[in-house]
Image (cartoon, coloured by chain):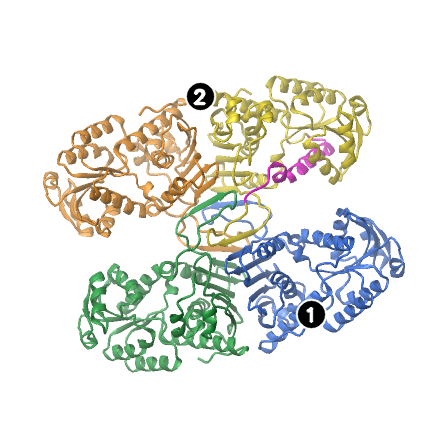
Chain colours: A orange, B yellow, C blue, D green
């Protein structure tokens, strides 16, 4: 099952530095091409991770060595690339989100219907070992059916205001990850959402009309209730927790630690380090496992487990949350 | 400050067995009278904890030894007793809730306005050492202003269906405790509430039109967001947790344990006992401290810290939550 | 089984303030007499806890209301009082240790042989709920036979040097508690001991020829190995831990906490308060349960579970430890 | 500083599979040769990790591409290989222990004196991130001077009896790792040792005259006391802990976990998985960091931090422990 796939990596930003080393570490993937419309950027990334640098997309799409394309370009270009790569008949791994608008997501899905190439959306948190351990515990019946599900995602510091401006808003930018993760764990999608938000940490974010702190509730068709806890700031680091509660018990995931050192002194006992890292460190392994799922699905001829439809649903729910917070009412997402 | 107050205890049910020993343990309180309209019940409780048993309310109200009255009768009788005791000019400690309806609560408050006797509502969770340690940490500025506040209250097993029928519904019966506690910690009352509920544990509860599992969100005037997590069933015992989050950090209260034993074997490590106890065990100390506050306030001539107005506000919020869950919309409580 | 025993309390020092309230809280014990050769001291303690104050020992010993005597006088007077009280035919609860010398302990045991009154030595740590929970877990077979057993007892601050001078040395004064507790848990007494000691915290203690930090090993007849970890100073409070290890697993007791608050900030996470208290606070409950065992044994006509022979054995082992540390060799205690 | 060193790997057993991938992962090391006197074994390992397979040691020693040699052969061959490789003038990384006998260790040290090539002994536990974090905390003065130091090393299951027979005894085979680690953390070597041992888990080990459970005490020149806790069996996995205690506080390292999942149900709460892994998994990273130290030392022309003299000292102490346990007396190691 370790048949080797030739891979083109589109985009040379932060995520290229995540995917580059992981492609190289994977025995089933071979980095053939690095593409960026600006050739010098492609050169730099290729110098680090290998692959042929290019600014010529057509040559990538016609390259017989390239069997799969990883789209790690700016979000608003994802749909255009999906259309072109699908037309070229190559497998696609697209960094999340598909797009910020449902209209463009639908365009991508239409393109994939016409050219049904293997497609995977990079919802990497599903592939985090702790998150999947929790989901497996649930699937093994350890807690019975999920009755309540909770997720905390508190980021260490607010992003630059330039980022906030183009982020699509906090629900579309961040809550969407919790939404996808929790729907995947629960095995269902909400029929109703209600969200509250405030701007308590960074007034600049409020000045842009965005929120930096939200609480979201989802109600599932089964009756299960979901809470999502998001903050753009967190004094003690990147706080990532899950809690699933059922008739038979509860499973939780705790935060990761850089070390296992415990301190006792005259001011504090059993103390641990702050959670200093952010998502690239916390979820580092998950990107590898996401690529591994992409590879395994293509090799075995099945659909990757994280689909475009999942991305569309998460986006629809995130939009419903944003509307709920804005208009102060419960919303039923439209799928 | 240990001036001794003569106390009459009205009611001989479960709470009489909580308050009886605590009155006796308190050097500033003397149990003078045990009252129940059924004399034999009064006799039994008096045999255990002392005090003169009686079924004659008038004799209690005219007894010069009785300076304070503890109302621990069925909820729907609280207001009637408050009116009578206030008219008799004696201090009142009333077991929560004041009543299930705002109309009758208003009647009690009117009576207290006409006869302004010292009045304390028994919101005992405020007097739990862990809860007050958390509030003190917040007041000492350890986390900065509260931005998020969360409360879990999951009960070990659903109550008998007869209890559910007269409970006023899950929000009025249980969530109200979290509401009061969180408003007290936050120092403010919500401007908006949104609540979701389901019946997932005990279908009998659903058949009565009630819920056995809820998630509630409160939005405070400051922008602070609050989550309340309630369940009528919990496999691992009585789960009681708080979490307060601010710019400078987070404080949490963990669950209590009967012992400090930790187990390691070939199936589980660092394992602790289930949380077997329910509220009488978990909050046992808090009832003593509540009586102590009542005593201290009367002796020093100040108002007890847990007022009838607090009880009215909590009830108004709980009603708003119930309406929100029923009608699927965000509600602004009316105070 | 709540037959009430009349009790005389000999001694009015620190331990009188421990036993006084606990005698009063116990429904089977009645504090009849407080004795101290200095009458004014007896008066003061009697004013707090009740009982008839006296400086006349003979009147105590001939008082028909006094059925049991609690000896809480200075250690070097224990044996003399035991001889007198035994001759008077009254039950004895003697604060530990019996004495610092084996010779005088043997005198006490001889007196108890001649006048075989009920006798209990106050090894209170056996009656601590955590310690007995650990022993019960072991007896229930949770870990199989004990193979290793460890105890930490680190005191918050060194005692005054005047106390050190008459303490009999660190092993006799402190390690003896761990020795008794561990032999009781293991159900056997060591055949060999080896101990190392240093003076690292308080040079005054070293100047007196004593140690302020020791490690002790015991080898049991079964082959089980025991480690005892003692320190006269501990920055984070009174550190009291146990660990029992067997073929099937491990049980530990963790330290007690004053509250269940957990703190997260930018310097530390999951941090708890220091362990501020010392033995009177940490083992407060155990004194009550020790008196309860004393009462229960007398009422039911059986021997109390903590005997003079246990006290003699613990002292013999502690002496062997002291010799081992001094002479740098392994010692076999003589029982 | 990433000058690339050509490396020959001697030995193709279990440790070859540890070092092979780590050499390949290190940008400063290049695996040139795999040597085993049995050519077919060398072929197999070379097929997995690269390098030229050979059974001709002379060709390795004269190969100009080989600048450093990793000796991962059976323990009793280490000294012979050290002599030969030192004579050939190549840097040496030798898997621990140097040898089981002090006589042969001295022969190796003599050879290194005559041919002073860079030499590093693979005491990998020093390079474990948790262990070095604890040492750094101590060096940063977090606890003041070390007064007490403790180490637990309990292995999941006893080794095959064939292994036990040639292991040199439990102290030489296992305790030696704790000894080196603790001396390295403490910055000093013991002046006295005392050890107790038993055979409680596997009677076969006792039948061979060996122990499967030991407690060891070391006394340091500074007065610091050390406890080492070893067991050949552990129901809950590979238990590895450290505790350093000083005037200002305590630092501990906790065990590693495969995941961060926590379970709550009606039999156990806050429960984690057993510690399933053994040393190859637990200390996996440390082997990489050990090779990195080897590389960094050679490149910068300094001595590697883990010397032959360290290995000799640890062996001398382990022998003293074995003698102490056997003869029941305190021993002063001879260095």
Query: Where is B163 relative to D70, above or below?
Result: above
Query: Where is C270 relative to A113, above or below?
Result: below
Residue neighbourhood size for the residue with mark 1, other residues' Cα within 10 Å, grouped as few (<14), some (14–19), many (≥20): some
Residue range corresponding to the magenta coloring: B274-302
Q: Residue at x 74, y 50 (%)?
A: C22
| C-alpha distance separating marks 1 and 2 | 74 Å
In-front residue for pair D175/C213: D175
Point out residue D182 in the picture as x, y percentages from the top left corner. Answer: 45, 67
- When asked about the image quadrant of residue A9, the answer is top left
Q: Residue at x 24, y 74 (%)?
A: D90
Is there one chain holding both mark 1 and mark 2?
no
Q: What is the chain identity of the residue bearing mark 2?
A: B
- Mark carried by residue B329: 2
- When asked about the image quadrant of residue A134, the answer is top left
Query: Where is D139 relative to D193, above or below?
Result: above
Q: Which residue is mark 1?
A: C168
Point out residue D222 in the picture as x, y percentages from the top left corner. Answer: 52, 72
The secondary element bearing badge 1 is classed as loop
In-front residue for pair C276/D211: D211
In-front residue for pair D174/D24: D174
Point out residue A35 in the picture as x, y percentages from the top left corner. Answer: 16, 43
The answer to the question of whether label 1 and label 2 lie on touching residues, with beta carbons closer than 8 A, is no
- Mark carried by residue C297: none
């Amino acid at each position: 099952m370790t048949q080797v796939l030739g891979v083109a990596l589109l985009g040379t930003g932060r995520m290229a530095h995540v995917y580059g080393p992981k492609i190289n570490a994977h025995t089933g993937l071979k980095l053939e091409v690095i593409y960026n419309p600006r050739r010098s950027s492609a050169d730099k990334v290729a110098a680090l991770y290998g692959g042929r640098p290019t600014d010529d997309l057509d040559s990538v799409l016609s390259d017989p060595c390239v069997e799969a394309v990883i789209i790690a370009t700016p979000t608003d270009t994802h749909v255009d690339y999906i259309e072109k790569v699908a037309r070229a008949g190559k497998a696609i791994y697209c960094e999340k989100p598909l797009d910020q608008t449902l209209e463009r997501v639908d365009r991508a899905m239409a393109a994939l219907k016409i050219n049904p190439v293997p497609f995977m959306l990079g919802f990497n948190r599903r592939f985090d070992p702790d998150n999947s351990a929790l989901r497996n515990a649930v699937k093994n019946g350890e807690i019975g059916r999920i009755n309540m599900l909770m997720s905390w995602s508190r980021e260490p510091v607010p992003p630059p205001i330039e980022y906030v401006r183009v982020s699509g808003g906090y629900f579309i930018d961040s809550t969407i990850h919790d939404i996808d993760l929790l729907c995947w764990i629960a095995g269902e999608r909400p029929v109703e959402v209600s969200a509250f938000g405030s701007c308590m940490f960074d007034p600049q974010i409020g000045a842009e009309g965005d929120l930096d702190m939200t609480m979201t509730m989802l109600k599932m068709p089964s009756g299960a209730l979901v809470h999502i806890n998001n903050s753009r700031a967190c004094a003690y680091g990147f706080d990532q927790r899950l809690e699933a509660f059922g008739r038979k018990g509860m499973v939780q995931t705790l935060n990761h630690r850089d070390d296992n050192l415990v301190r006792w002194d005259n001011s504090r006992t059993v103390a641990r380090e702050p959670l200093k890292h952010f998502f690239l460190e916390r979820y580092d392994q998950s990107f590898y496992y996401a690529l591994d799922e992409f590879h395994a699905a293509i090799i075995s001829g099945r659909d990757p487990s994280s689909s475009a439809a999942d991305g569309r649903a998460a986006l629809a729910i995130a939009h419903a949350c944003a509307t709920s917070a804005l208009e102060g009412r419960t919303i039923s997402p439209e799928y």
